[in-house]
Each structure stands twice: as structure tokens, then as C-alpha cells.
């Protein structure tokens, strides 16, 4: 076996079996632990000779809108369009290539039922009507004069991670498994402000929202959620919404499945009952083992997975690594993420990167001394309500095998001794 520096690590720093190191140790003692990632200094570097071409000529001029480095051109969404129905399909966020908690706007996942409408904001309006005292319409200019608030939160399709139901574990980079979820700073007008201006009638219980795309997609939103924290979002990560994500305005319902976040929002009808649209009857419901189906299962439950390392990565031999991943919960803040390197027998608590915000991506990290032997890595999230992400077997026992939406079980990556990583059910 290859010689490793495991022996050099103080056993007091070990947090769980399989080489998981105490979460507080890495930043403080990374050097002492022996990351070994840096190269040796060459005499040419010391002498200042061998200057690169870009050090010898002026750089490119200023640009109106910056783009990623040409060396990062493979960090793109993975498009999976439905060839039978043009405009219908998805594009995944490459979560395995990103760090931190914010998804760059150009990499936010996409789900369209009928393509991206090319809306002229001068001609677009929002209609608010139904069980209200004063039906109102808003031009975009008028909406931009209302008070705005900002919040960081994830948007996750209810169908995200559904490959987890497959009989065999899907072998794909993690972004193409869990990347129908993205996280942004959204700024817009609290919906309650518009509702108060229109004056909601006491018998109202729901709001039916509709978009201006040719899909004319509509859904029903509980009035409580509309009043609590729903945003009519106009800005995404500081700039106006991207066309793919709903320009010029969309709904954001923090923590709820993304189908309710109607894009290209054009109509809000206050109603007594839900409308029973396709996306709340035929879709976004889950058939249970007893033959009944869950309906209006809005909240996205706690989820986590390791993005680094993950399938597609190759370990560069035994030594010290930093495990990193994402966790979130539609019910509130993430309280704890634990990591296992022995298939779930022992767990170590990961460090949560600040800020830890409700209904928002939370980044976790943990140092790991890999000794080169086969290992099974898992992560497990617990949110502030005490809800803990279930093992796959427990999720299937509860929900049966006919589900498609709301898959949030613990994910396992097998690290082989050759350094390759695969998805396993363990
Ligand atoms: N008008 C409209 N709104 C829509 C959709 C759509 O096709 N049309 N798709 C919904 C679904 S199923 C999802 S998952 C989210 C996707 O949002 P995104 O494309 O900004 O990621 O938008 C929702 N809102
Ligand atoms: Mo969705």
C-alpha cells in the first residue's frame, strides 16, 4: 500500500471513522495537516524569468457586460429538451462545478412548458382581480415604484432528484441529478402589498396565478403563503430577471416547489377554491402505497448531497481533501449536516458556511483524510424543525415505488481505490 500521512494526524482531530477530521481543524491546521496541493518553487520563478505572453502586452479593453473566462466554457447548463414538444424541457444547473451558495444567473436551471416568451416590458401588465374590492392592473413602470425587498432563496422543481427512484443508481454528474435547483438573491414587491391595495374579500382562500407564455400555465397558491412571504420578483442577483427565469416578473414562494413560482406573471385571480390545474392534479401529486395521492405537497423537504468529490471527479491519490456540498430545506434553516465515510455507520458534523439562511442553499465543508481504500461517502441534513433527511429505504417504505416528485433521500457516493467515484444505493 502507498504510504500516507494518516499517522501524522493527531487522533484527537478525527471526528468519525474512515478519515473524517474535525470540522474546525482544516482552516486552522490545513498546512500542518499536509494538504500537499502546492508545487515546488522553481529557480526560474525566483529569478523572475520566463514571463508569460500575457505579461508582455496590454490586456483586452473594457467590456459592456463581462463573461466568464474562456477556460471555463464547459461550465454550462445541460439542456435536455423534449424533441416531441418544442419549447418543453429542462436545463440543469452544473452544481458539481460551482462553489458557495449563489447560482450565477446564466446557470440558473430552466424549466419551460412552452419556451421562453420574448416579452416587451412596455406592453406587459399584471392583472389582479377576482375576490377583491378593487381590481387593478400594473404596468412594469408602476410596479417598479412600489417598495421592494430582497431575499436569498432556492428555487427547486418538485421533480428534482427524481432519478433517485430508479431501480439502478444513475451515473451522472451531480448537477444532472440534483440540478433542477438553483439559488439567487431575488428582489421585488411583497405580494401582500398589492393584495392590500386591491382589498381581498373575506371568503378568499386561494390565488390563481397565470403566466404570459404560450403555455398559459396556471397554478393555485394558498392565500396564507401569498400574504406571508411571496414576492413579485423583478430582480435576480442584482439585475433584472433573465428571460429564461421569468422576465419581466415572476412569483417567488420561498421553500415551495418551483411550479408555483409562475414566470412571466400576467394574472392573479383571488378565488375561494383552487383551480385544479394540470400541474396540481395530473402532475406534482404523489401516488402513495395505499393508492391515495398526496396533493398540494408544496414544501420542499430537507435535502443534501456532496458536490466535491462526486461522480466524474477522480481522487488524486491518498491524502487530505475537503469534502464540500449543498443542503437546504423548504421549512427553514439548515441546523446540521453530517457526513459519513463508512456508509452511514459513523457520522461527523460538517462546518456550515455562513450565512445560513432560511429556505436557502447552505454550503457545508469537512476535511477528510483518504487512506486510499474503498469508502462510501454520504451526507445527511437536519433542519431547524428537527426534520432529518431520510435514508433511501425509509423514503421508499413511506412513499412506495410509484413516486416521481419530492425525492429527498440521502445520497451515497462510492470512492474506489483507483480514485473513481460512482453513485450507489447503500
Ligand atoms: N409561466 C410559466 N411559469 C413556470 C413554468 C412555465 O413553464 N411557465 N414552469 C414552472 C416549473 S415546473 C418550474 S420547475 C419553474 C422553473 O423556474 P426556472 O426556469 O426559473 O428555473 O418555473 C415554473 N413556472
Ligand atoms: Mo417544475
Image (spheres, helix red, strand yellow):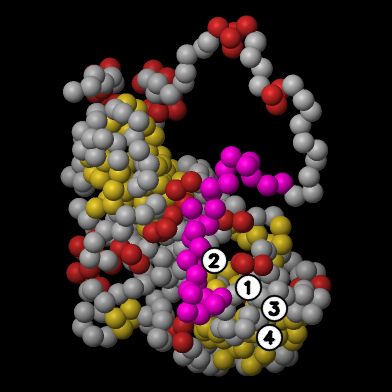
What is the chief secondary structure element of the magenta stretch? loop
Question: Which dot, 4 or 3, sits closer to the camera?
Answer: 4
Disc 4 and disc 3 in contact, CB within 8 angstroms: yes
Question: Which dot, 2 or 3, sits closer to the camera?
Answer: 2
Q: Which residue is mark 3?
A: 194
Q: Is disc 1 surrounded by few (<14), some (14 to 19) or many (20+) residues within 10 Å?
A: many
| Numbered tag placed on residue 128 in the rendering | 4
Give the vertical position of 41 relative to 117 (above or below). Answer: above
Give the vertical position of 386 relative to 281 (above or below). Answer: above
Disc 1 and disc 3 in contact, CB within 8 angstroms: no
Instruction: Label 3: state its secondary structure.
Output: helix
Instruction: Label 4: state its secondary structure.
Output: strand
**Residue 233 at x, y percent in the picture:** 65, 67
Q: Earlier in the sequence, mark 2 or mark 1?
A: 2
Disc 2 and disc 1 in contact, CB within 8 angstroms: yes
Q: Earlier in the sequence, mark 2 or mark 3?
A: 2
Please report the residue visible at 61 percent of the width from the left and 67 percent of the height from the top. Answer: 245
Q: Earlier in the sequence, mark 4 or mark 3?
A: 4
Q: CA distance from mark 2 to mark 4?
A: 26 Å
Q: Which residue is mark 2?
A: 110
Q: CA distance from mark 2 to mark 3?
A: 27 Å
Q: Which residues are magenta?
A: 66-94
Question: Which dot, 1 or 4, sits closer to the camera?
Answer: 1
> Is the CB of mark 2 within 8 Å of ligand 1?
yes
Please report the residue visible at 23 percent of the width from the left and 35 percent of the height from the top. Answer: 417
Amino acid at each position: 500500500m502507498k504510504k500516507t500521512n494518516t499517522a501524522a494526524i493527531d487522533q484527537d482531530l478525527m471526528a468519525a471513522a474512515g478519515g473524517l477530521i474535525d470540522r474546525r481543524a482544516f482552516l486552522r491546521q490545513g498546512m500542518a495537516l499536509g494538504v500537499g496541493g502546492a508545487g515546488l518553487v522553481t529557480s526560474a520563478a525566483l529569478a523572475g524569468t520566463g514571463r508569460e505572453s500575457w505579461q508582455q502586452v496590454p490586456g483586452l479593453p473594457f467590456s459592456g457586460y463581462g463573461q466568464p473566462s474562456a477556460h471555463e466554457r464547459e461550465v454550462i447548463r445541460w439542456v435536455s429538451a423534449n424533441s416531441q414538444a418544442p419549447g418543453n424541457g429542462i436545463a440543469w444547473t452544473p452544481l458539481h462545478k460551482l462553489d458557495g451558495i449563489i447560482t450565477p444567473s446564466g446557470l440558473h436551471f430552466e424549466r419551460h412548458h412552452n419556451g421562453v416568451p420574448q416579452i416587451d416590458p412596455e406592453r406587459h401588465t399584471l392583472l389582479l382581480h377576482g375576490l377583491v374590492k378593487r381590481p387593478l392592473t400594473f404596468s412594469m413602470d408602476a410596479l417598479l415604484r412600489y417598495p421592494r425587498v430582497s431575499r436569498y432563496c432556492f428555487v427547486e422543481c418538485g421533480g428534482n432528484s427524481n432519478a433517485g427512484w430508479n431501480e439502478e443508481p444513475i451515473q451522472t454528474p451531480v448537477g444532472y441529478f440534483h440540478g433542477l435547483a438553483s439559488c439567487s438573491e431575488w428582489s421585488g414587491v411583497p405580494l401582500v402589498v398589492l393584495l392590500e391595495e386591491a382589498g381581498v374579500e373575506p371568503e378568499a382562500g386561494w390565488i390563481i396565478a397565470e403566466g404570459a407564455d404560450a403555455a398559459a400555465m396556471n397554478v393555485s397558491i394558498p392565500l396564507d403563503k401569498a400574504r406571508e412571504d411571496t414576492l413579485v420578483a423583478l430582480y435576480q442577483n442584482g439585475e433584472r430577471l433573465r428571460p429564461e427565469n421569468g422576465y419581466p416578473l415572476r412569483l417567488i414562494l420561498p421553500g415551495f416547489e418551483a411550479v408555483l413560482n409562475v414566470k412571466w406573471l400576467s394574472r392573479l385571480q383571488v378565488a375561494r377554491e383552487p383551480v385544479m390545474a394540470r400541474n396540481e392534479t395530473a402532475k406534482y401529486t404523489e401516488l402513495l402505497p395505499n393508492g391515495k395521492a398526496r396533493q398540494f405537497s408544496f414544501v420542499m423537504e430537507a435535502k443534501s448531497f456532496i458536490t466535491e468529490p462526486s461522480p466524474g471527479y477522480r481522487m488524486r491519490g491518498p491524502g487530505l481533501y475537503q469534502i464540500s456540498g449543498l443542503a437546504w430545506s423548504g421549512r427553514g434553516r439548515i441546523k446540521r449536516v453530517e457526513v459519513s465515510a463508512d456508509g452511514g455507520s459513523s457520522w461527523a458534523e460538517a462546518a456550515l458556511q455562513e450565512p445560513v439562511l432560511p429556505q436557502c442553499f447552505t454550503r457545508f465543508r469537512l476535511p477528510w483524510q483518504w487512506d486510499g481504500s474503498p469508502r462510501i461517502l454520504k451526507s445527511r441534513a437536519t433542519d431547524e424543525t428537527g426534520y432529518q433527511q431520510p435514508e433511501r429505504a425509509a423514503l421508499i417504505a413511506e412513499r412506495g415505488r410509484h413516486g416521481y416528485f419530492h425525492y429527498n433521500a440521502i445520497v451515497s457516493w462510492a470512492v474506489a481505490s483507483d480514485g473513481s467515484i460512482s453513485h450507489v444505493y447503500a
